[in-house]
Image: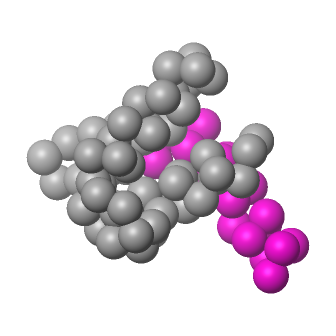
Amino acid sequence: MDWDYLRYIRALAIGGTLAKAGELLGVHQTTVLRRLDQMEESMGVQFFERSRDGLQLTPVGETAFREARSEERRVG
């Protein structure tokens, strides 16, 4: 998976909300939402369950998050 996608998944998983992920990435939360929607649509999967309390990784999202952490360690 593309690192750009993975960094958004990582920020969303760590931050737990669109706003926190936006802070981590240095972008507005609407950009995070738009990117998440694009990723999920283009790949045909759902990475996060959305609720009023925030975001929760789905099993597919957990796999992507592990990949993001691994890639982050690899590139330093």
* Membership of 69 in magenta stretch: yes
Position of residue 49 measured from the top left corner of the image (x, y, whole percent): 35, 38
Read off the magenta span.
57-76
Is residue 68 toward the left or the right of residue 11 in the image?
right
**Between residues 36 and 70, which one lies in front from this camera angle?**
36
The C terminus lies in which quarter of the figure? bottom right
Give x and y (percent) for residue 61: 56, 43
Residue 26, located in which quarter of the rendered image? bottom left
Residue 66, visible in the rendered structure? no
Instruction: Name the residue at 37% across, 36% down.
Output: 34
Q: Say which quarter of the image contains residue 29.
A: bottom left
Q: Is residue 19 above or below residue 56?
A: below
Residue at the image position 17 percent from the left and 54 percent from the top? 53
Q: Residue furthest bottom?
A: 76
Say which quadrant the N terminus sits in. top right
Horizontal and vertical percent for residue 37?
Answer: 41, 30
Magenta stretch mostly in which secondary structure? helix
User: Could you tell whether 40 is left or right of 75 in the image?
Assistant: left
Quarter of the rendering containing residue 33? top left
Count all numbered tags in the image, as a single digit. 0
44 lies above or below 3: above
In this view, 63 is above or below 67: above
- x and y percentages locating residue 8 in the rendered image: 52, 54
- State whether residue 67 is above or below residue 1: below
Taking the view exactly as shown, the residue that stands out farthest to the left is 52
* Residue 12 in sight here: yes
Does 16 lie within the magenta span?
no
